[in-house]
Amino acid sequence: MRSVSSAVVSLCLGVLASSSANAQSLEFVEQSEALATTLSCTAPTGTLFLDGDAGNPVLGQPRDYIHPGADVITNGTWNAYVYSSTSRDYVRLDLTPTNSSQGLWWDVEFSSRALGRPLTVGTYTNAQRAAFASSGHPGLDVGGDGRGCNTIEGEFQIHEIVWDSVGLRKLSASFRQRCEGGAAVLRGMVAYARP
């Protein structure tokens, strides 16, 4: 991976590049650069970027259960669900990739319900599983293809969020998620806009 790509993606996700970075293809490198040109930290609309620790059992490195490895999904069918049109504190984005080798479906959830305020631009730390976040904790949940976490620790940043009278119009966010209190990390970015 070219150093500029790993540096840009790492800065946007707030972490060092995963250990699998050196094994990634040139195509992935180019897609990663497109996601984070000029350090904007926003992906092109209609993009889900997932980069989970691939792990190495020989070296004792854990593997992310949800998505070990990296994918940039730019083609698929999107749906957005807002669980309360008035409080605007819980959003779920569903993506069905056109290419089934990138997964049959992915769900990304963000919540500020347990914070008692709407989702807005900002950084949300100490996140717990979105549906079960306790008072004072934001909610996060990324899963797909029948894989999910019982408990989640993580953080996310909303880079852009636009609401209108219909509901969620646009959302751009980055996130880090750890399942079941483990050390493996799933990093990602999502950019959605209602057609």
Image (cartoon, grey):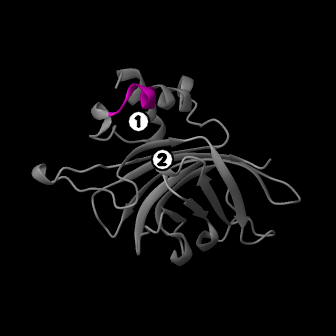
Q: Residues within 10 Å of mark 2 (few under 14, many from 20)?
A: many
Instruction: Look at 55% across and 32% down and name the residue there.
Output: 35
Residue 25 magenta:
yes
Amino acid type of the residue tagged 1 in the rendering:
Ser
Residue 124 magenta:
no
* Quadrant of the snapshot with the N terminus: top left
Q: x, y (%) of residue 153?
A: 40, 64
The extreme right residue here reads: 165
Q: Nearer the viewer, residue 125 or 9?
A: 9
Q: x, y (%) of residue 129?
A: 48, 70
Question: Pointer 2: what residue?
Answer: 188
Q: Does residue 29 appear to the left or right of 46 in the view shown?
A: left
Magenta span: predominant SS is helix
Q: Determine the image quadrant of residue 89.
A: bottom right
Q: Does residue 35 appear to the left or right of 23 in the view shown?
A: right
Label at residue 74: none
Label at residue 10: 1
In the rendered structure, which segment of residues is drawn in magenta? 24-29
Q: Determine the image quadrant of residue 81.
A: bottom right
Instruction: Look at 48% across and 31% down and name the residue there.
Output: 32
Amino acid type of the residue tagged 2 in the rendering:
Gly
